[in-house]
């Protein structure tokens, strides 16, 4: 995906399960999973050509996500042909009302 489809992570409310993220310096795309309070980070799964790989995951801290990753813009996520998770839609409505 092009860089113009991604934006900086400014708020933790953007980090919802199902959101696509991309490294600022890499072209790999990942999908966010749930927040793991015991490990103090978000579970991240590799995502390639429309397939989420559940057999491999990494836990990344919120601070690292904000500093080193970009998140897919809400407009791009809505235009995807696949279904957008309800939590992402709720976060989008919250951000618009703020």
Image (tube, helix red, strand yellow):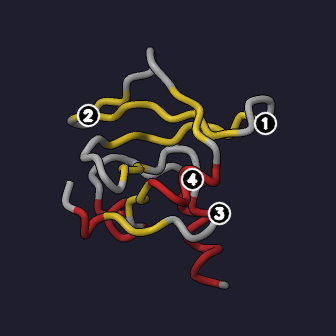
Q: Nearer the viewer, mark 4 or mark 2?
A: 2
Q: Residues within 10 Å of mark 1 (few under 14, many from 20)?
A: few
Of helix, strand and loop, which one carries label 2?
A: strand
Q: Nearer the viewer, mark 4 or mark 1?
A: 1
The circle on residue 48 is 2
Distance (Cα) linking label 3 and label 2: 24 Å
Q: Please report the residue visible at 20 percent of the width from the left and 54 percent of the height from the top.
A: 1
In front: 85, or 71?
71
The circle on residue 86 is 4
Mark 3 and mark 1 in contact (Cβ < 8 Å)? no
Q: Earlier in the sequence, mark 3 or mark 2?
A: 3
- Indicate whether 70 appears above or below 10: above
In front: 86, or 25?
25
Instruction: Point out the image quarter for the C terminus.
Output: bottom right
Distance (Cα) linking label 4 and label 1: 21 Å
Which residue is identified by label 3?
A: 13
The circle on residue 37 is 1
């Amino acid at each position: 995906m092009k860089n113009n489809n991604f934006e900086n992570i400014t708020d933790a409310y953007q980090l919802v399960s199902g959101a696509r993220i991309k490294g600022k310096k890499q072209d790999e795309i990942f999908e966010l999973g749930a927040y793991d309070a015991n490990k103090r980070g978000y579970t991240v799964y590799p995502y390639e050509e429309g397939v989420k790989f559940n057999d491999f995951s990494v836990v990344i801290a919120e601070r690292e996500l904000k500093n080193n990753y970009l998140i897919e813009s809400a407009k791009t996520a809505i235009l995807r042909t696949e279904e957008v998770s309800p939590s992402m839609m709720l976060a989008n409505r919250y951000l618009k009302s703020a």
